[in-house]
Amino acid sequence: MTVVREAPPAPMSSAPRDPWESHILRRLFLYFALATLFVRLTTLPEVIAYLTNTNTYLLYFVAPPAILGTILMGGIRRTFRASPTYLWMAFFLWMVVAVPFSTWKGGSTQSVMDYGRVNLVFLILAGGLAITWKDIRLTFYTIAAAAVVTLLESNLLMDEANGRIELKASGTIGNSNDLAAHLLLLLPFLLFLVLGRGRPMLLRIAGLGLIGYGLWVILGTASRGALIALFLVLLCILFRASVMQRVAILVIAIVLGAGVMVVLPGQTLARLGSLFGEEHKEADESAESRWYLFKTSVLYTIQHPIFGVGPDQFADYEGQSSLAEGKHGNWHATHNAFTQVSSECGIPALLFFVGALVSACRLVIRTYNRAKREGYPEIANACFCYLLAMVGYLGSLVFLAEAYSFKLLVMVGLSVALSFAANRQMKPVEDKYSRKGPVAGRTQFARPATI
């Protein structure tokens, strides 16, 4: 009797092959989508308009093909593969439902239409066209490139007002706080270029240098919210690091902190120091104004718990209400993305909003844990960098009214694409034993071939 070992099964994919995966047009449309993302994240149209006084309409060249391609190549179906997308769409639909109950229906109607037309498309652009891990890697590289361009813009267009770095090209990131939050979102994707085996040493050095410069810009904005967000990012890194890595990170943080004390202007340090009790007139006045807006937004949430005062109407409603009471009014946004949603769109909208963000993070955390467990370092690094970006940006949103920003839509859509592409890249558990020869600790079965 001759016994022949049964041939091992062929490797299996973790997910069925997408029918559009190898379509040449999908790759073309993906490039258009990445170009659209790059243009928005770098704010290039705003910078060019500032420098040349010319509107280049860059988005009109790249966004329409990207949107069309996403629809034709099944991108909408892919984006709706996981709960973060459904929760965000529920948030948007609740914004629509809240419009008829707005204190200014015309203003809310225009704001919601603009959100759906300009920003909502980034949900499917980020989540619909990236299928393979190569696509995800390319997406991360695109965001990293946007970080580099943003740092160049920060250097070329840097201005200083009251010890705070801001950009001369006024726009979506011209304000100090907005610039700091923007860099907190982008820099972790630049870190992805540095991490991992096989990266050229020159690339690592350049990447670390750019990250260091970006941290200097963030601290130079004297944004106390950004400083708190940076601390949260540091805690996240320490939580995932080994003991030796924690010691090294803490030493580096202390050295950088000492260097910052020397390099940053005195006005900047004084403003940041107000977070720890030091007196600073402008910072104290800002904190008082923000505290008033926060309390008012909570009050409006209690008074209008279901539909709020209307999407994008907090500033107008607060100002009008203050005038009716004989007061001057603040006429500013809430400076808190979460109470911005609850006061303008109601508590149900806040639940959908927070639920989508938490669901996106949980999706990536599960992928990260599997990649770490099964030995896929690049996937684990990508997930970790994504989570750092979310921690930093969401931490800054506690002090900023950017609930309707397209960046959150990008991150929610990217969580879906990242998770599914990574799980397709990683072999299922059975594949670990799909090899010739005996495996220690695993029973080998054979069947008689000939007798």
Image: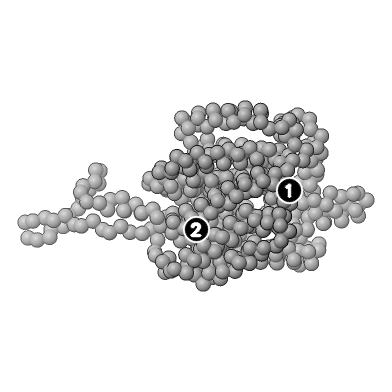
Residue 429 appears in the rendering = yes
Res 343 → quadrant: bottom right
Instruction: Give the residue at mark 1.
Output: 168
Amino acid at pointer 2:
Ala
Q: Which residue lies furthest to the right in this view?
A: 326
Q: Which residue lies furthest to the bottom in this view?
A: 72
The label number, if any, that marks residue 16 in the structure image: none
Q: Which residue is drawn at 25% across and 51% down?
A: 435
Q: Which colour scheme is used?
A: one colour
Q: Position of residue 418 (x, y in %)?
A: 49, 55
In the image: residue 268, left or right of residue 318: left
| Quadrant of the frame with the N terminus | bottom left
**What's the distance in space between the residues labelled 1 and 2, CA to CA?**
36 Å
| Quadrant of the frame with the C terminus | bottom left
Q: Which residue is drawn at 54% across and 28% down?
A: 251
Label 1: how many residues lie within 10 Å, few (<14), some (14-19) or many (20+)? some
Residue 274 appears in the rendering = no
**65 shown above or below 34:** below
Q: Is mark 2 on a helix, strand or loop?
A: helix
Amino acid at pointer 1:
Lys
The label number, if any, that marks residue 417 in the structure image: 2
Q: Where is residue 413 in the image (x, y as percent from the top left)?
A: 55, 58
Q: Which residue is drawn at 66% across and 28% down?
A: 262
Q: What element carries label 1?
A: loop
Q: Position of residue 289 (x, y in %)?
A: 80, 43
In this rendered view, identify the residue nearer to me: 219 or 145: 145
Label 2: how many residues lie within 10 Å, few (<14), some (14-19) or many (20+)? many
